[in-house]
Amino acid sequence: MLLRSLALLPLVAPLAVAQQSLGMYWDDIRHVVVFDADTDVLLGSLLLSANDCSDCVLLADLSLGFAVNSTGQVWVIDLTTPSPTLASGTNPIPVSARGGDLALSPDQRYLIVTGNSPTPTSVVDLATRTEIGTYTFGIGVSSAEVASDGSVLASHFVSTSVRRLMLDGFGNLSDTGELLNTSSSPFNCIVAPGGQFGVAVLFLNARVVSFEIQGMTSVDEQLLVPILSGVGLALGPAGDALYTVSGLDPSVVVQRFGYDPSTGLIENDPVWTRALSGDPSCVSGGERLAVHPDGSKVYVSPFGSNALSILDTASGSVLGSLPAGGDIHGSVCVVQRSECFLVLGQGSGSAVFPSTGHTWTTQLGAVENAYPVTLEDGPSFPLPVPRSRAHASTPPTRVAERDVQVLLWNPSVFPANPEQWSSRLHVTLWSNGRVTADELGPRNGIELDIEVVTNPNGTRHLRFPFEIDGL
């Protein structure tokens, strides 16, 4: 098994899109709407006893959606029924946060709910639907985005900085002490594929700033339409297209810029610019833009508009719209059903891993964690600092061991071989910092590899890239 040590992560082509994609948006202060994002057909709306709605997110297996308001309630939406319904169990989930943004952890076990001061930011365990922790910092956190290594980009629109927090495997938030000074109000942040760079949109002077996440250093910036307020941004699935929304009541402006996710550089001139009617105002952190997983269209939710606009990503032309029962107030999100998972556990065996679309029999003794992955993006695991050795002759000792496998189910792209899997990798971390991997068991269509990534600040992370035969 090849073990690579890299300074930067290379990007590869995304996996062919074949599975169903769903979208969700708030159409007024009390309704959430779910739609088929492949056909742009409404699947239904759900009346919630909620005011001051803000953000929404969907799980990668399209089983559940979550919608939050500013009064400390996270509503759980069942997406497995023909029309959206309230999920059984604890619903809504009470939280301490009174903010407006939602962010899922890379393994989708935890949900971050931002909190404006004086309320803290909450962390919710989605398995138990309970708030397991809170984090309070200064004026609060109104926007959060989680990177593949657990870094949390946290900002507040009345501040002038974006901070890097860390979310560990137990749902604990901590401050790294690293921050990006923006000299203006950061309204929202996103993470580029690969997890090395982030982009923030600034409210007061309508700019986007690209930065390196490790160390939080600015790389590039781009002015949007002058005199407007920057309120939203999104990246295409490959990370090479940056979409922004800015505005000044009664209109909003959507722009597309070229972006390089391997360097963080933004092209100077927009590919296109499109003006729409609506108010740019929105809850800080709320996603006013969502790109379809195949990269063909972008959804825009202008505050106060009576429709969700759909634009062609190549030209910026209006393809259509989705109606709202009232003026749109909250965010929009679009997710493709995950067809590929990285599963982690210990030991060999035949543990079962169920997902909404398929159930696999793995080569692991037990599945401890699972991450939705694509060919272009996946989780990144921080490595500890190697222990010092008192004598050169002292042999290294084992620090940790894990078993890893990648699973895929895609009958549309691979009708003759819809269920594919990699061999099991037995990974060992040694006290001298060395990482070894043994390839065990058969594979069917997927070659799993391992990389040790060294960041510019010297920290190391472990990643598991993979290839699919024929792609």
Image: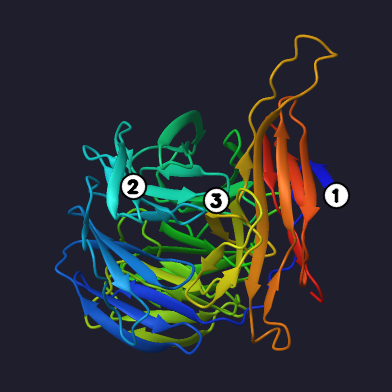
Write down the quadrant of residue 136 in the picture. Answer: top left
Task: Identify residue type, mark 3.
Answer: Val
Mark 3 and mark 2 residues within 8 Å of each other at the beta carbon: no
Viewer-closest of 144 and 390: 390
Residue 369: tell me if it is visible. yes
**Count of numbered marks:** 3
**Could you tell which of marks 3 and 1 lies nearer the N-terminus?**
1
**Could you tell which of marks 1 and 2 lies nearer the N-terminus?**
1
Relative to 66, residue 297 above or below: below
Task: Identify residue type, mark 2.
Answer: Ser
- The crowding category of the residue bearing disc 3, from other C-alpha atoms within 10 Å (few below 14, some 14 to 19, many at least 20), is many
For mark 3, what is the residue? Answer: 199
Secondary structure type for disc 2? loop
Task: Identify residue type, mark 1.
Answer: Leu
Q: Position of residue 322 (x, y in %)?
A: 37, 85
Kindly report the distance in space between the C-alpha atoms of the residues bearing marks 1 and 2: 42 Å
Q: Position of residue 435 (x, y in %)?
A: 76, 37
Viewer-closest of 135 and 333: 135
For mark 1, what is the residue? Answer: 2
Q: Position of residue 120 (x, y in %)?
A: 27, 39
Relative to 439, residue 159 above or below: above
Residue 266: tell me if it is visible. no
Horizontal side, residue 55 vs residue 93: left or right? right
Looking at the rendered image, the quarter that the C terminus falls into is bottom right
Which residue is found at the position 31% from the left and 43% from the top?
132
Horizontal side, residue 130 vs residue 146: left or right? left
Q: Nearer the viewer, mark 1 or mark 2?
A: 1
For mark 2, what is the residue? Answer: 142
Relative to 119, residue 257 above or below: below
Q: Nearer the viewer, mark 3 or mark 1?
A: 1
